[in-house]
Amino acid sequence: MSAAPRAERLTIAGPAGALEALIEEPAERRGSAFGVVCHPHPLHGGTMDNKVVHTLARASHALGLPSVRFNFRGVGASAGHYAEGVGETADALAAVEFGRARWPGARPWLLGFSFGGVIAIRAAEQAAPLRLVAVAPAVDRLGPLPVTPSCPWLIVQGDADEVIAPRAVFEWAAHLEPPATLVRLPSTGHFFHGRLTELKDAVIAFARGELPPPQPVKG
């Protein structure tokens, strides 16, 4: 079993004030990248300690990459108030800038779950990540999304999601150009109960180029 990542709780500068953050560095670092993980909706109990967010950070560590988890403005000890996704996108970009300063020369990966998946997609427009991972992204909740990111990216969606309509995600994904890699997990709800290992494995396989190349998908 690999050693647990070294963890450090701190605050980082955000556009609305200090953001509570958790920095984790794997015992053995590989590559010149770091992960920034975005959590679910701030007004519905989403925090950086969410188990899906935790799983995405663990996938990053398994690949030898440090991670930045953070609470959006108004969550936990983070300053500010909910800002309709616009301010939260700015928070994610602040976390990216923190990572660039912390690990000079490294480039970001953006990962997010639900609301955080949409924020990761929005932030990708400015952050120019090496990879993008959106898990059960709330594509039907926050208005139109930007153009398809130019980096390789992964969408993971359970087909029994009780919060985000799976069909909405599949129909949205079907029109992405170039297409994203889509992993559908059968009989899987929004919070991936009993399927977190499969989620982690899908992210790792994507990062290692072990999944089939992206293809246009049908809803």
Image (tube, rainbow, N blue to C red):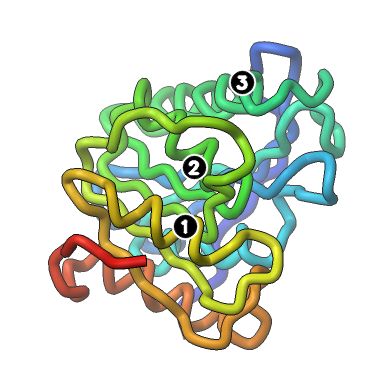
Marks 2 and 3: which is nearer the front? 3
Q: Does residue 109 sit above or below 215 in this rendering? A: above
Mark 1–mark 3 CB contact (< 8 Å): no
Q: Residues within 10 Å of mark 2 (few under 14, many from 20)?
A: many
At 41% across and 62% down in the image, what residue appears? 170
Question: What residue is shown at x 22% (from left), y 49% (from top)?
Answer: 152
**Which of the marked residues, 2 or 1, is nearer the chain's N terminus?**
2
Could you tell me residue 42's position as x and y percent? 78, 40
What residue is shown with label 1? Answer: 169
Residue 135 x, y percent position in the rendering = 50, 59
Identity of the residue drawn at 19% across and 61% down: 216
Secondary structure beneath disc 3? helix
Q: Please, what is the three-letter code of the amino acid marked with disc 1?
A: Val
Residue 37 appears in the picture as rendered: no
Q: Which of the marked residues, 2 or 3, is nearer the chain's N terminus? A: 2
Is 20 left or right of 45, judged from the image as shown?
left
Percent from the top left, x then y, of residue 102?
A: 45, 30
Pick the residue in front: 169 or 192: 169
- Of marks 1 and 3, which one's residue comes earlier in the chain? 3
Distance (Cα) linking label 2 and label 3 = 17 Å
Mark 2–mark 1 distance (CA, rounded to whole Å)? 22 Å
Judged from the image, the secondary structure of the residue bearing numbered disc 1 is: helix
User: Which numbered mark, 2 or 1, is in the foreground of this view?
Assistant: 1
Q: Is residue 47 visible?
A: yes
| Distance Cα–Cα, label 1 vs label 3 | 21 Å
Residue matched to label 2: 36
Q: Which residue is mark 3?
A: 86
Q: Which mark is residue 81?
A: none
- Mark 1 or mark 3, which is nearer to you? 1
Determine whether 216 is above or below 132 in the image.
Answer: below
